[in-house]
Amino acid sequence: MDLARQLRRHNSDLRMSKQEIREEMKDVEGNPQMKARIRRLQRDRARRQMMKEVPTATAVIVNPTHFAVAIRYHLDGMAAPMVVAKGKNYLALRIRQKAIEHQVPIIENPPLAQALYKSVEVGPGDSAASAIARWPKFWPTFSNS
């Protein structure tokens, strides 16, 4: 009986307290506040770069209020269209305003805008061809500008 009690006490003494666990996590993974700040700065930088690319878009496909996806496509120089910017809600409004400011054509097609927003990432690595191929009536819209 005494041996079981001693063993249980010994095991509970070996456990770390919540404060010790927090300190160890900070040492191993870094301060959570600093990691969050770095992620926020990286997100802001990516968003600013994305907004700079909107004037170079061939067209902006929008859901009237919620989604906007800016696409660049040139028949002679590109194998597939590329998403240069995408946004939801407030960011979609900003993309739309920037497109109007730079006379980029705006196409209202809610299903296409939602499909592109959900399935394609911004940048040259991901192609929008598979999502756009489902809506071939828009191919003539993507001509060289």
Image (cartoon, helix red, strand yellow):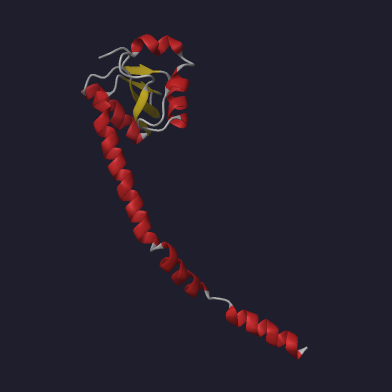
* 123 or 88, nearer to the observer: 123
Expressed as whole percent of the image width and height from the top left, the position of residue 127 reads 41, 26
User: Residue at point 44% right, 71% down?
Assistant: 23
User: Residue at point 24% right, 25% down?
Assistant: 55
Q: Is 82 situated left or right of 2 in this image?
A: left
The quadrant of the picture occupied by the N terminus is bottom right
User: Residue at point 33% right, 49% down?
Assistant: 40
Looking at this view, name the residue that lies furthest to the right.
1
The image shows a total of numbered marks equal to 0
Up-down relation of residue 19 to residue 68 (above or below): below
Up-down relation of residue 15 to residue 130 (above or below): below
The quadrant of the picture occupied by the C terminus is top left
Looking at this view, name the residue that lies furthest to the bottom.
2
Looking at this view, name the residue that lies furthest to the left.
101
Q: Quadrant of residue 51?
A: top left
Expressed as whole percent of the image width and height from the top left, the position of residue 79 reads 38, 19
Q: Quadrant of residue 64?
A: top left
Expressed as whole percent of the image width and height from the top left, the position of residue 131 reads 47, 22
* 107 or 41, nearer to the observer: 41
Expressed as whole percent of the image width and height from the top left, the position of residue 29 reads 43, 62
Q: Is 133 situated left or right of 69 in this image?
A: right
User: Residue at point 47% right, 30% down?
Assistant: 119
